[in-house]
Amino acid sequence: MSAQIIEFPMNRVRPAQQAVRTPGHYRSRSSARPATSTSVRPMAFVKAILGWTLIAVVSAGLLLGVGKTLQPAEASSTVTSSTATTFEYVTIMRGDSLWSIAEEYAPNRDPRDYIAEIVALNNLTDSVVDAGMRIALPVN
């Protein structure tokens, strides 16, 4: 591909016009104002009031919204029987695993379900336990 050269006709280009100012054009600002004593713009005043009111309302809403999310959690004093779980603490000994504990403490239940309850109750990331750990076992 080759580049094309675009030529503009110079006879159509107008020269820049010079601004012609007359001596009367250089007036001070004070003489350019109307002769009234107060130059209050009511619409500008109303817009400013409405703008600041809107900013204040939005700011207050954000602050109150953030304040509610930062409140500390409070424990509920009412416990329903479906959420109440009784448990006992057991210290893990050398050679113990959650599977052996599940077979020992819940022999008539599926060990996988019991292990899942142990993991959920103790907030464990996986089913690996170390000797010396103290964990809670659900008793149902």
Image (cartoon, grey):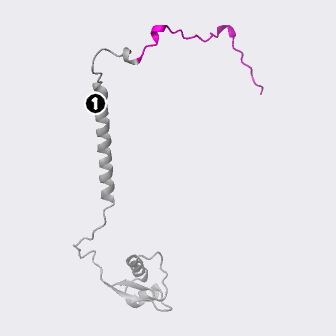
Q: Image quadrant of residue 17?
A: top right
- Please name whichever residue, 123 or 50, is drawn nearer the observer in this view of the structure: 50
Q: Which residues are magenta?
A: 1-28
Q: Residue at x 27, y 68 (%)?
A: 74
* Magenta stretch prevailing secondary structure: loop
Residue 82 in magenta stretch: no
Secondary structure beneath label 1: helix
- Please name whichever residue, 62 or 86, is drawn nearer the observer in this view of the structure: 62
Q: In the drawing, does residue 136 fall left or right of residue 9?
A: left
| 105 in relation to 1, above or below | below
- The C terminus: image quadrant: bottom left
Visible in this render: residue 113? yes
Q: In the drawing, does residue 140 fall left or right of residue 21?
A: left
- Please name whichever residue, 130 or 1, is drawn nearer the observer in this view of the structure: 130
- The N terminus: image quadrant: top right
Q: Residue at x 37, y 78 (%)?
A: 121
Q: Residue at x 72, y 15 (%)?
A: 7
Percent from the top left, x then y, of residue 68? 30, 58
Which amino acid, by three-letter code, is at mark 1?
Val
Visible in this render: residue 107? no
Percent from the top left, x then y, of residue 120? 39, 76
Q: In the drawing, does residue 38 fall left or right of residue 95?
A: left
Q: Which residue is mark 1?
A: 46
> How many tags in the picture?
1
Percent from the top left, x then y, of residue 40? 29, 24
Percent from the top left, x then y, of residue 24? 45, 8
